[in-house]
């Protein structure tokens, strides 16, 4: 099998506009996430909002097995033409990993069909992600939980459809809980929403988080499947 082709998409605005974010992710969140795949068997490229077509041309998407999506401040600036294109590729079978504040990305909301709203509090307290589906391939090689010492809290209710499989439930020091690792299928595509990743904490340097990202790419990579034929049949 050839190496999964991974495209890491980042809005890349916070890092250029806020000093406290640049201190954590000086080369952009996309570069730190790309490091998670370094010295493992993946073909990785990055793409950002301010590139032509947001770096997501038809050709790039055609060559992408799994797309990772990090956005926050500028969801509305993502063009509908690119959203249409990503949406179409997911239905064809491209995997999609939606990270943290990507819950409000246009393409995620379209794929879910709900508001994707949640509660949040930026307090820098501890989060513990409990693995509630230990046999799931996304949990391979992990301990029974992942502890992140400083995070932004996301709390339920999280207005998404019931996931096909739920891999992580987060507990927060403030007492809230959250469905932090949600698996979906849309068309031929596999979608994984993964909560951790606020821009002012070095979440994507954590080894367990990096393992989850690699496992999720492996899980979401397209399989050959059978032809999908629709319309009138002779
Ligand atoms: Zn955040």
Image (cartoon, helix red, strand yellow):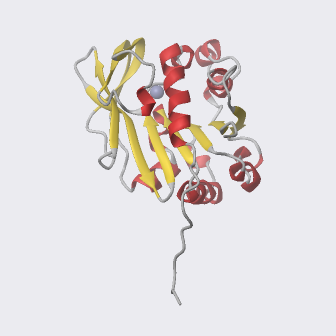
Look at the image and tell me whether residue 71 can be seen: no
Q: Is residue 71 left or right of residue 129?
A: right
Task: Indicate whether 169 appears above or below 165.
Answer: above
Residue 16 seen anywhere in this rendered image of the structure: yes
Q: Position of residue 47 (x, y in %)?
A: 71, 38
> Is residue 226 or residue 162 the one in the foreground?
226
| Position above or below: 95 against 234 | above
Q: Is residue 1 left or right of residue 203?
A: right
**Closer to the camera in the image, 113 or 152:** 113
Q: Residue furthest front?
A: 1
Say which quadrant the N terminus sits in: top right
- Looking at the image, the residue that sits furthest to the left is 175
Residue 49, above or below 225: above
Query: Is 105 or 213 nearer to us in this picture?
Result: 213
Query: Residue 90: which quarter of the image?
Result: bottom right
Q: Quadrant of residue 199?
A: top right
Task: Tell me which residue sits at (63%, 16%) in the image.
Answer: 19
Q: Position of residue 64 (x, y in %)?
A: 67, 46
Q: Please name the residue shown 62% across and 25% down the image.
A: 33
How many discs appear?
0
Q: Is residue 137 left or right of residue 217?
A: left
| Horizontal and vertical percent position of residue 71 | 55, 37
Residue 3, position as x, y percentages in the image: 68, 36
Which residue is at 55% across, 36% downward? 218
Residue in the picture at 52% in, 14% down: 206
Furthest residue in direction top, as rendered: 149
Compared with 231, 180 (above or below) is above
């Amino acid at each position: 099998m050839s190496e999964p082709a991974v495209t890491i998409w980042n809005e890349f605005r916070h890092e250029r506009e806020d000093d406290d974010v640049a201190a954590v992710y000086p080369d952009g969140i996309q570069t730190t996430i790309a490091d998670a795949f370094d010295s493992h068997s993946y073909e990785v490229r990055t793409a950002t909002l301010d590139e032509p077509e947001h770096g997501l041309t038809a050709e790039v998407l055609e060559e992408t097995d799994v797309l990772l999506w990090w956005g926050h401040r500028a969801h509305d600036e993502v063009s509908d033409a690119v959203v249409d294109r990503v949406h179409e590729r997911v239905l064809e079978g491209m995997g999609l990993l939606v990270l943290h504040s990507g819950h409000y990305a246009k393409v995620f909301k379209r794929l879910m069909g709900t508001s994707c709203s949640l509660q949040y509090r930026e307090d820098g307290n501890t989060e513990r992600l409990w693995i509630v589906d230990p046999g799931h391939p996304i949990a391979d090689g992990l301990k029974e939980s992942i502890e992140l010492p400083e995070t932004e809290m996301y709390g339920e209710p999280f207005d998404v459809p019931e996931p096909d499989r739920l891999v992580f439930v987060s507990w927060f020091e403030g007492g809230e809980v959250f469905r932090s690792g949600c698996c979906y299928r849309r068309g031929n595509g596999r979608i994984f929403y993964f909560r951790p990743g606020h821009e002012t904490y070095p979440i994507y340097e954590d080894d367990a988080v990096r393992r989850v990202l690699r496992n999720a790419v492996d899980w979401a990579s397209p399989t050959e499947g059978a032809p999908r034929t629709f319309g009138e049949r002779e």
